[in-house]
Image (tube, helix red, strand yellow):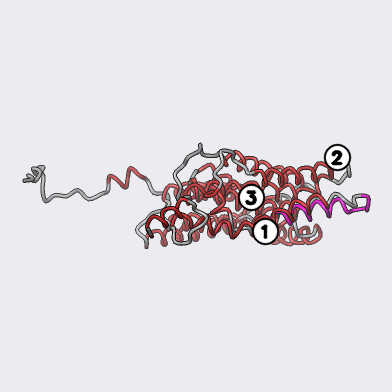
């Protein structure tokens, strides 16, 4: 009778705490009130933010309040691991998320086309929306791996929403890079997370190259945060010391050298994981970048000497670290296979052991 009662309770996965199959659903039911409250607050907040737009400057404040609050609420919710177990869906986006995206889109469209907010001031808001879409798509992509249930419905395609998120990140960067560098720098930081996460998940060289270019322009935008007076003073002093008053652009060989060191360090980090193919690709990027810096230094003997010395020292340190681990800089697959020791103890194949 006890076994029959337990099996009957296991049929209802929400009822009996002793049923192992019902634990995720029971925990999910406990989280439902909190989830509903947060979702309701988010929807109501985005709706109420449409009030008071006649106040000067409130439209921009309302957009950023809605976007930042929506990102924080979605990042702090930890129910996504169990939500897909209770209600698997054939759609790549839930209804609640679709409504949130719709409400954010209405805020942005009204701010741009009706309230007349300058589009460059909304670059960070668009970038945050792209980051939110990419993060939600990443959570949806991880859920099927954690789900203990057999797949009863066709898998969703969160990669489509991740692509839309990446497009919005690029659009937000383009909107603000010309006039508001700190917003473009913030969007670049989100882009570094986006492509870095894709690199760790998919291990594609394309994502590695885009990540390198994103980091390079992030490094450039960091320098743009300095005032024009400070930048001009630094350039004047540096050109006088190196004798490059006529070609101030050659100073980039020293200005960009710290990013070359960071690239070599990233290659060493990938080699430690080990991700030899990605490490070799990063080595190639570092060599190409070092060659470009060397070409920029050819206009000045002082810059040429400094660039050669610093590049040689960096390469020597990186090679020494690889040598200690038994690896090499820019490994060659064919050479590695050729240099493998050939066993000489036996030159004839041994017959297989007979099994009784």
In this view of the protein, which residue sits in the foreground, 121 or 103? 103
Left or right: where does residue 335 sit relative to residue 207?
A: left
In this view of the protein, which residue sits in the foreground, 99 or 268? 99
Q: Position of residue 237 (x, y in %)?
A: 74, 62
Residue identifier under label 1: 242
Part of the protein shown in magenta: 54-73
Residue identifier under label 3: 191
Q: Position of residue 344 (x, y in %)?
A: 13, 49
Nearer mark to the viewer, of 2 and 1: 2
| Mark number displayed over residue 113 | 2
Q: Is residue 63 magenta?
A: yes
Q: Is residue 100 magenta?
A: no
Question: Extreme top residue here?
Answer: 154
Tell me: residue 345, above or below residue 109. Answer: below
Residue 243 appears in the figure: no
In this view of the protein, which residue sits in the foreground, 167 or 157? 157
Q: Secondary structure at mark 2?
A: helix
């Amino acid at each position: 009778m006890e076994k029959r009662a337990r099996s009957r309770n296991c049929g209802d996965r929400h009822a009996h705490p002793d049923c192992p199959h019902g634990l995720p659903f029971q925990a999910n039911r406990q989280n439902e009130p909190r989830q509903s409250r947060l979702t309701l607050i988010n929807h109501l907040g985005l709706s109420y933010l449409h009030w008071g737009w006649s106040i000067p400057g409130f439209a921009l404040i309302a957009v950023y309040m809605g976007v930042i609050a929506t990102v924080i609420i979605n990042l702090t919710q930890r129910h996504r691991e169990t939500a897909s177990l209770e209600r698997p869906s054939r759609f790549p986006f839930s209804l609640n998320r679709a409504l949130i995206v719709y409400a954010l889109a209405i805020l942005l469209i009204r701010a741009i086309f009706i309230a007349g907010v300058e589009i460059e001031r909304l670059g960070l808001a668009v970038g945050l929306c792209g980051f939110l879409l990419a993060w939600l798509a990443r959570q949806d992509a991880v859920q099927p791996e954690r789900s203990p249930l057999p797949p009863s419905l066709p898998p969703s395609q969160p990669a489509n929403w991740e692509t839309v998120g990446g497009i919005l990140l690029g659009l937000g960067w383009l909107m603000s890079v010309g006039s508001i560098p700190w917003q473009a720098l913030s969007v670049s930081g989100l882009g570094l997370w986006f492509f870095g996460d894709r690199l760790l998940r998919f291990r594609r060289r394309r994502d590695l190259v885009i990540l390198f270019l994103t980091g390079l322009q992030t490094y450039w935008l960091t320098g743009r945060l300095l005032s024009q007076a400070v930048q001009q003073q630094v350039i004047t002093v540096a050109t006088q010391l190196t004798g490059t008053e006529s070609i101030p652009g050659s100073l980039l060989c020293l200005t960009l050298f710290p990013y070359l060191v960071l690239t070599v360090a990233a290659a060493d980090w990938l080699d430690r994981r080990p991700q030899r193919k990605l490490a070799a690709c990063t080595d190639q990027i570092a060599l190409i970048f070092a060659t470009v810096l060397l070409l920029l230094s050819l206009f000045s003997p002082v810059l040429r000497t400094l660039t050669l010395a610093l590049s040689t020292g960096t390469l020597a340190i990186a090679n020494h670290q690889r040598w200690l681990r038994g690896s090499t800089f820019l490994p060659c697959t064919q050479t590695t296979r050729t240099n493998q020791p050939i066993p000489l103890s036996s030159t004839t194949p041994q017959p297989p052991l007979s099994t009784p």
